[in-house]
Image: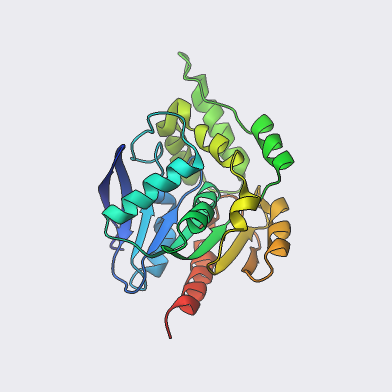
Amino acid sequence: MAIKKGYVDTRDGQIHFRTAEGGSGTPVAMFHQTASSSQSYEKIMGRLEGKYRMYALDTPGFGQSFFPPEAATTPYYVSILLEALSNLGIQEFHAVGHHTGAAIAVEMAAVAPERVKSIVLEGPVWLSQEERQHWLDTAIDPMVIQPDGSHLAKIWDRVVGLDPNHPADLCHREALDTLRAGERWHEAYIAVFNQDSYELFSKVTCPMLLLCGEEDVLFPYFKPVCDAYPEAQSSVLPGCGTYAPDNCADRLAEEIDEFLNEQAPA
């Protein structure tokens, strides 16, 4: 699998990315969940290698990308990642997003419709104001580095709690990604739960594929967004949970490939 890594400059620092450039046509940009990194897309990229030019980017503050100078918002993430793609020579692209990455992809499609040709949202964030406030009240648990290392076990428990069925090596990778993001990892949650998803979805004009694992923590919100946008393609992923890009890579790659084939010029 010919996945390469690189950095691209932006106004506030360097964005780290993974790429597989063997394909042709409109490139595919991939955005990860919190507190993961672009590594979470390696299995999907491997399965689609040779079909598409793919770029998986580390969101600012995660993976090996720079830390934002202050607590970020989704408009900030979108602006920086669009700048990174421009500096990579990518103007038009298909966007694939998982959880936080889905929130980023939706906002990109809303604010830069001339650039985003389609969006694939796995675990779309579709929340009312009341639901967003509930998540802000219950899901924000900042990591505080402790002298006795007790924060390490807390992060491990958080990762395992999101999807108890995934393998230990995946838990290890996700815990390391969270630890690398450090005491600021939760800022992305705050950014997403302050995003007005209803307003942004209403501005999306490009083709949309909605996907969600039936064991995903966001699955309770999946049917409502599918009902709100019946023109979008949608599919439930049986047996898939919060870490679907790793644990359900075959099914996700198949769904993405079929959808993107439909978007190709005749």
Q: Residue furthest bottom?
A: 266
Can residue 21 be seen here? yes
User: Which quadrant, please, contains the N terminus?
Assistant: bottom left
Q: Measuring 47% from the left and 73% from the top, which residue is drawn there?
A: 260
Residue at the extreme top: 147
Left or right of 149: which side holds 238? right
Image position of 81 with respect to 130: above or below? below
User: In this view of the protein, which residue sits in the foreground, 118 or 196?
Assistant: 196
Q: How is the image coloured?
A: rainbow
**Residue 58 seen in the figure:** no
Spot occupied by residue 86 in the image (x, y as percentages of width and height): 31, 55
Q: Residue 258: horizontal and vertical position, in percent?
A: 51, 75
Residue 234 locus on image (x, y percent): 63, 67
What is the x, y in percent for residue 111? 48, 54
Instruction: Indicate whether 198 appears above or below 174.
Output: below
Q: Residue at x 72, y 51 (%)?
A: 220
Point 42% across, 81% down: residue: 265
The quadrant in which the C terminus is found is bottom left
Q: Is residue 83 left or right of residue 156?
A: left
